[in-house]
Image (cartoon, rainbow, N blue to C red):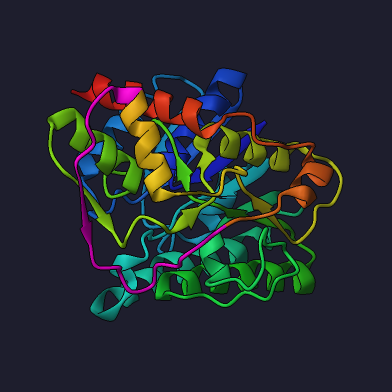
Amino acid sequence: MRVLVTGAAGFIGSNLVRTLLARGDDVIGVDSLTSYYDPAVKRANVDAFDSPRFRFVEADLADIDTETLLSYDVDAIAHLAGQPGVRGSWGDQFGAYTHANITATQRLLEALKGAPGVRLVYASSSSVYGQAESYPTTEETLPAPHSPYGVTKLAGEHLVHLYRANYGLDTVALRFFTVYGPGQRPDMAFTRFLRAVSAGEPIRVFGDGEQIRDFTFVGDIVAAMIAAMGVAAPLPRVMNLSGGSSVSVNEVLAVIGEITGATVDVRYEPTVQGDVFRTGGSSELARDALGWTPQVSLREGLQRQWDWVRGLG
């Protein structure tokens, strides 16, 4: 398989590229190496792909012309590029989110009109649900984002569905539930927590720690994306990918203490605007359509991420 991976230098993208190359696939990775966090981290991810079957294109997806995108001649596209983060999506930074999450997606879909038969797998987010009224949340739940970030991810979803309905494009949107694991972004909770423990520093938690999240290991997300690119049958418009953990942040901190053998010093801070109290998704649709179920437990995944953090030190 020949795959175009957008956002290839990021957390999930680099894990996906590594797995595709190990399978023997050819990969074209596109990434603009934005400064949302240290671009050197992303550059190191790209430099690690030492394979003749990998080609890296440093570019803003919103600026690449259609002819260039079509020239890559791929079988499938994993669209992971975007501006992440709930906290930064308010105020003056909103323009960066509309550019990376909406405009770039629309440009990619326009190019895809000229490439019949290429499946686009769009990386969406559980943030589109906001403060959901029922759990586990199914794809039938009406999306109601609680942050500007969630609004832009839902807008990207709508574009994907729009081009599917009007132009017959082969697309699917996958809603990720709180992805973690080796390579996780430095601003994300588990990396911050584990690095703080490694350095003997306090852990900063926004809120009282009783907020509940459905954590999903990155390897399970990668497996689902590869399955979605490879299944021959038409897929549902949208599917949840949830790890099935649904535990509180305080419970996670207890597991971190057990794994690291350290005393966890927690400093609770005010809740951030846009954060929801609970997430928890049903992945039955992905199980039926892809044969996918999460394989890595939260404890095992945290152990792997702790090993990765220690390796960085």
264 in the magenta segment: yes
- Residue 304: percent from left, percent from top: 42, 24
Above-or-below relation of 230 to 93 = above
At 61% across and 20% down in the image, what residue appears? 23
Asked whether residue 183 appears in the rendered view, the answer is no
Number of on-image labels: 0
Query: Is residue 264 toward the left or the right of residue 83 in the image?
Result: left
Q: Quadrant of the N terminus?
A: top right
Q: From the viewer's perspective, is 271 left or right of 136? A: left
Occupied quadrant, residue 198? top left
Q: Residue at x 68, y 76 (%)?
A: 142
Specify the principal SS of the magenta part.
loop
Position of residue 204 relative to residue 125, above or below, is: above
Give how far across and how far down residue 3 sits, in percent: 60, 38
Q: Position of residue 148 (x, y in %)?
A: 41, 76
Q: Residue at x 46, y 40 (%)?
A: 13
Work out whether residue 79 can be spotted: yes
Query: Is residue 39 left or right of 150 when viewed as pictured?
Result: left
Q: Which residues are magenta?
A: 259-279
| Residue at horizontal 64 percent and vertical 29 percent from the top | 295
Q: Is residue 33 magenta?
A: no
Which of the two residues, 217 or 104, is positioned nearer the viewer here?
217
